[in-house]
Image (spheres, rainbow, N blue to C red):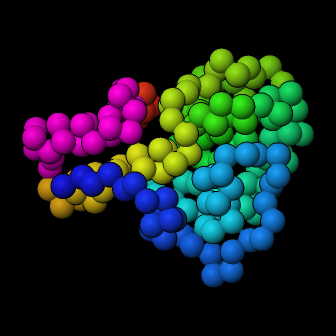
Amino acid sequence: MFELQTNFKQILQLLNPRTQPIQSTVTFLSDPHYLEFLQQCGDTEITPDIDLFGYETAIKENQYFAEHVEKLSQQLWKIGRTGQGDEWFLDRNSFDILFYNHDLGMDLDESLKHDQFQSMQVNFFQFLQFALLLQAMDQHLDKKPLSTIGLEQFQYTVNRIHPELFSHYPFDYL
């Protein structure tokens, strides 16, 4: 029911591929999967809670981020947002995906600190794998409720990506 996608090139084809790939991307980020995503895909909503920025939007959002949170913007790169206004970031050093909950009451300003971000403890490729599993879950739930066995299978598949990923995700779907 829930299949883990393991081929990165095939994952990109499931997203929002560009008709013309971008030849140059940001050179100060060295996560090869994220850079390839920027080259190959435009803005992509995978689920209502995972809306990833394409190249142009990422540049614009990160310029704004750098203007308002200069020091932190040297450590983090904004990659997307949720439908509720929360945001997804890529840690420039560890390549971990981080979640920022805007309900914490802190605006994106100079008082914001790195420890206010929740690490998903996965890299960008793993995050895409997880996002596609969430998409499959959403599609399943649109048709019928999830059985206990279905939920166990979903959790098992998610935790194949990272043993604690299911518990790290900041939203409760079920």
What is the quadrant of residue 44 in the picture?
bottom right
In this rendering, the count of numbered labels is: 0
Q: Is residue 20 above or below residue 143?
A: below
Left or right of residue 133: residue 145: left
Q: Nearer the viewer, residue 90 or 99?
A: 90
Please report the residue visible at 25 percent of the width from the left and 36 percent of the height from the top: 155
Residue at the far bottom in the pictured view: 19
Q: Residue at x 70, y 22 (%)?
A: 114
Residue 90, position as x, y percentages in the image: 65, 39
Which residue occupies the foreground of this view, 68 or 135? 135
Residue depicted at x 60% and y 41%: 88
Q: Quadrant of residue 92?
A: top right
Quadrant where the C terminus sits is: top left
Q: Nearer the viewer, residue 81 or 168?
A: 168
Q: Main secondary structure of the magenta part?
A: helix
Q: Does 161 lie within the magenta span?
A: yes
Quadrant into which the N terminus falls? bottom left
Is residue 170 highlighted in magenta?
Answer: no
User: Is 34 left, or right, of 74 in this rendering?
Assistant: left
Pinpoint residue 7: horizontal percent, then vertical percent.
Answer: 43, 59
Q: Which residues are magenta?
A: 145-167
